Image (cartoon, rainbow, N blue to C red):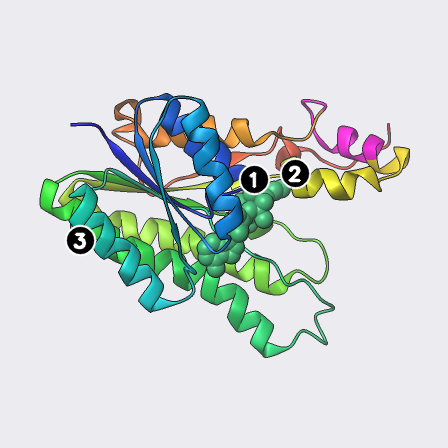
Amino acid sequence: MSKKAAITGGAQGIGKAIALAFADKGYEVCIADVDPEAGAEAIQELRERGHEGYFMQVDVGKESDVERWFSWIESELGHIDVLINNAGIARNAPMLELPLASFDEVLGVNLRGAFACSQLAAKLMKRQGSGAIIHMASTRGLMSEPNTEAYAASKGGLLALTHAMAVSLGPYGIRVNAISPGWIETADWQKTSERRTPVHSERDRLQHPVGRVGKPEDVAAACLYLAGDSAGFITGQNLVIDGGMTVKMIYEE
Ligand code: NAD
């Protein structure tokens, strides 16, 4: 029986790279995303590589959508081995003006949505006595730019959720870890980078000891590792994937 991986926000960016990487490793991949057009394109890309994949339009911030997704997974796929809570949004605005509704929206998708999916996935995983859950956090849960409060709180919350869930779910054979990417060059990021000046590009390079920003595939490779048997003794941890950005001190070149 093939292994099955469910990925939220898997239609684009980092999530799509994760879906392709898991499919390439023989997993059946199940994508949930709010964007049906991007979802259809992602499934097409999977098929072009010779893989089958499933897409459902799901807003992880809506409980009824999440329930519909997992009841489909249970009835059609029967079980699930890996859940990757990757869907994420940011509504950055000056802290003194951020509407509380925006704060709730970000927490509702990034943190509450991850918890809602985890609860239902863990119920299925508990039956088989095994499973891996990975939360897509961010280096913004560890360090901040100004005016990113809701996003930072949601990602910091995911780190706390990671160790709390690892402790609760360990006895059922379910491991829970987080990944904290730094700057990752997604299609969206590239759109903004076209407007970036040489000074910005140089600053990006200098920020990263490895001399580059990250690629979605860097994050996908880490997900495969954490989901696999070779990470069987790793739970409750946060793997930072940032080319060394968070360990670099500011100094004069
Ligand atoms: P992206 O915007 O390119 O893709 C996010 C995907 O999530 C999209 O397909 C979008 O439609 C989907 N999505 C948004 N809201 C959703 C919802 N409510 N329900 C279901 N799907 C939803 O973003 P990305 O850069 O690929 O980021 C993916 C994850 O990685 C996010 O959690 C983000 O916070 C995190 N992250 C990204 C970076 C980066 O530099 N790109 C850095 C650190 C962390």
Residue visible at 39% across and 67% down?
62
Estimate the x, y position of residue 242 in percent, counting from the top left: 60, 33
Residue position for label 2: 187
Check if mark 2's residue and mark 1's residue have beta carbons within 8 Å. yes
Q: Is residue 154 magenta?
A: no
Please give the range of residues in magenta: 201-211
Q: Is residue 209 magenta?
A: yes
Find residue 31 and report its image quarter.
Answer: top left
Estimate the x, y position of residue 68 in percent, counting from the top left: 28, 60
Q: From what the image shows, is residue 234 above or below residue 6? A: above
**Amino acid identity at mark 3:** Lys
Q: Which circle marks residue 123 in the picture?
A: 3
Disc 1/disc 3 C-alpha distance (Å):
28 Å
**Marks 3 and 2, the one that precedes in the sequence:** 3
40 on left or right of 133: right
**Marks 2 and 1, the one that precedes in the sequence:** 1
Residue position for label 1: 13
**Dot 2 crowding, Cα within 10 Å, few <14, some 14–19, many 20+:** few
**Is the residue indicated by label 2 positioned so its CB lies within 8 Å of ligand 1?**
yes
